[in-house]
Every structure is written in structure tokens, then in C-alpha cells.
Image (spheres, helix red, strand yellow):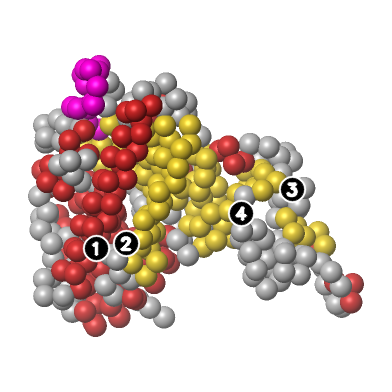
Amino acid sequence: MVSLDTVRARDGLADDASIARDLDRGLSLPTALYVDPDVLQLEHEKIFDRCWQYACHADALRQPGDYAVTQAGRTPIIVTRGNDGGLRGFVNACRHRLHPLATENGNGRTLQCPYHAWTYDLEGQLKAAPRSRREPGFDCSSITLAPVSVEAWDQWIFVNPDPRARPLSKLTAPIRELTDGLNADLENYRFSARYEYTMSCNWKVWAENALECYHCPTLHRSSFGKTYDVRPDQYDVRSWADTIWHSAPTKWVPTGIEPHTLRGFRFAFLYPGSFYAVDDYIGFIGSVYPTGPETCSAYVDMYTNPDGDPAIVEEWLAMWDQTLVEDKAATDLQQLGYRSGRIPHARLMLDSEAPLQAFLRRTWTALTS
């Protein structure tokens, strides 16, 4: 069985107290934790199997019988809207031989596995299995889908593989006052496109990049850094145990609109890898998740303001795609440094990268729990 002690012995890590002190003084996690396959296994067990992650927009689950498929870390999940109106989530694996019950969103009175036609109700109870009467002692009522936690956050549906997870509403309470306005604006935007990115870096490297804007004046000088005021006294960052907030005023619009009349950029992050944001023209929500020790993927669902100038909206979509492509290029190159094994830690700039420090502390707390 994988343990942190196994990783510590192999990679020469310091004791827990020393690593915690290093995080307090602005060092990163040991760089070995960004390349070791056993660390990824621990992160699945202690982070992605236990944390809330974005699943879908509530529109996918409006009507009784609606179901939506998603992934939380390594766990395939199906969320249903029952006939009683309740939301329920299950591991998307038939209890017969673990085939997925569905591979895309849909609507139905039941969930029927396409492999051998085992049929479940929307509450996860097995109702029928072909040839079950030929099996002595077979009892449908004793078989149910494995439950997971599911909860709505405004118009977004989140899932947690842990069926006994702490409620999302309590976890996110500190940031709700800020996200209430963000979500009220974003609720009126219309879905436009999904952007998908595959990175050759550890998932933490990509997430850490998303949590600081110290790089924005240089890496994004012709994209995000051109559009928003990213100076340290203008770019607001706040962090709590599991949530992080960014906001910045708009400084440039490609028309005669005065930037100071706009509401600007607002961004919320939920540990370990879900995020959403809005400005006056574009909104988005997405997630990053590991696909290997040194690879990850991210998807971003883009929404547009139907009242916005169409020319600006199109330019803003291109600006965001450029920004995310620039992030991919940078984080892919960063991974080379982590892989080298020559540098034990990165050094943070805490005045500008405090949310990154909060993210690292949260990760270390999870790994040592």
C-alpha cells in the first residue's frame, strides 16, 4: 500500500514539521511531489476522492428523469434528477461488471446498463436483471448503485466521490458573499463553447499558475495582462481554506467604452481544481484534473453576455483562449525544472502569491491526514 513514508524514504523528503515550516516561509512543496507516481496515487485517495468538483450546469438536470455524466478525479459519476425532484449522485458503474450506465447526458424513467441490461431506478436501486430468476438467492432489493455526494452551488452542480462529504455550502460559506454577485451576472450569459487543453505538467503546477497573477504582466502582456489592470495594488486576491478569490478592474476595451464603467474581472476557485469567473462580456467555468504524475487536462465552458457588443465578445473569447494557451506553454516548460531533480523547492513571492501558499498548505494537510 502506498504511503507518504514510502515516498519520503525514496525521495529523501524532510519530516512533516520541516515541510510545514518551509511552506510558512514561502517555499513550495518539495519538487519530488510533482513527479512521483505514488504521490498521484495518494492525491487520488486523499484529495480527489474526498473533494468537491464541478460537474455540470443545472440546465442538464432541470427535469425529472434527467441524468448527467461527469468525472471527479478517477471516479466516473452519474447525477440524476429523481421523480421527487431530488438530486442524487452515483458512481457511474453497474454493480454487475462495472460498465458505465451512460456515457452522455440524457433523460429516462430508469438507468439501464447497455452491457447486460441491469436496470436501476433514478434513486439507484436495482429493479431488474435479466435471468436473475435463474440465480438462487439473487435479490434485486439488496443491490444499489454506489452513492456519491452532490450539491448545487447556484446554477452549478458539484459532486464529491465521498458520500459522507462535508456539505459544499459550509465549505464555501466564506466566499459566498463574493460569488453571489458573480453568479447572478453569469446566470444571464449563454453557453458558447468548450475549450479543452492537455498539459505536460503535474496538475498542481497548472493550478498554481491559475492562482496567481504575478506572471500576468509578462506571460499575458498581449492577452489577460492587456485587458485587465494586473498591478499589485489593483489586482485583489483573497484566500480561505478551500476557496480563493481574484478580482481586477478592466483597463482596455477595443471600442470607445470607458473601462471604468465596467464591473471588471471576478474569479473564484474551489480546491482542488474547479474555477469560474465573469467579466462584462465573458463568463466561464471549468476544472483541471490529473491524467498522470506529470500530465493533466483542463476544460473550460465559455459563456457570453447576450447584451454585449458581438465584436468585443468574439475578441474576448479569443483573448481567453490565448491566455489559456499561454498558461499551457508556461506550465509545460515549468515541469522540466521539477523533473530535473536538481532543485528541492520553488521560492514564492508571498505578497503576490499568497493564494498559492494557501493552496500548497491545503495540499500538504490532505497528504498528511
Residue labelled with disc 1 = 332
If you read the primary sequence from the N terminus, does the residue marked by circle 3 or circle 2 appear first?
3
Residue labelled with disc 4 = 104
Number of on-image labels: 4
Check whether the beta carbons of the residues at disc 2 and disc 1 lie within 8 A of each other: yes
Estimate how packed mark 3 is, as few (under 14), some (14 to 19) or many (20 or more) residues with alpha carbons within 10 Å. few
Q: Is residue 270 above or below residue 24?
A: above
Please tell me whether mark 3 sits on a helix, a strand or a loop. loop
Please tell me whether mark 2 sits on a helix, a strand or a loop. strand
Q: CA distance from mark 1 to mark 4?
A: 31 Å
If you read the primary sequence from the N terminus, does the residue marked by circle 1 or circle 4 appear first?
4
Residue 81, image x, y percentages = 66, 43
Name the residue nearer the viewer: 99 or 171.
99
- Identify the amino acid type marked 2: Met
Residue 244, image x, y percentages = 29, 42
**Span shown in magenta:** 247-261
**Residue 108, numbered circle:** 3
Residue labelled with disc 2 = 199
State left or right for residue 5 relative to residue 48. Answer: left
Q: CA distance from mark 3 to mark 2?
A: 36 Å
Residue 135, image x, y percentages = 85, 77
Q: CA distance from mark 4 to mark 3?
A: 12 Å
Residue 179, image x, y percentages = 37, 31
Check whether the beta carbons of the residues at disc 4 and disc 3 lie within 8 A of each other: no
Magenta stretch, overall SS = loop
Q: Quadrant of residue 247?
A: top left
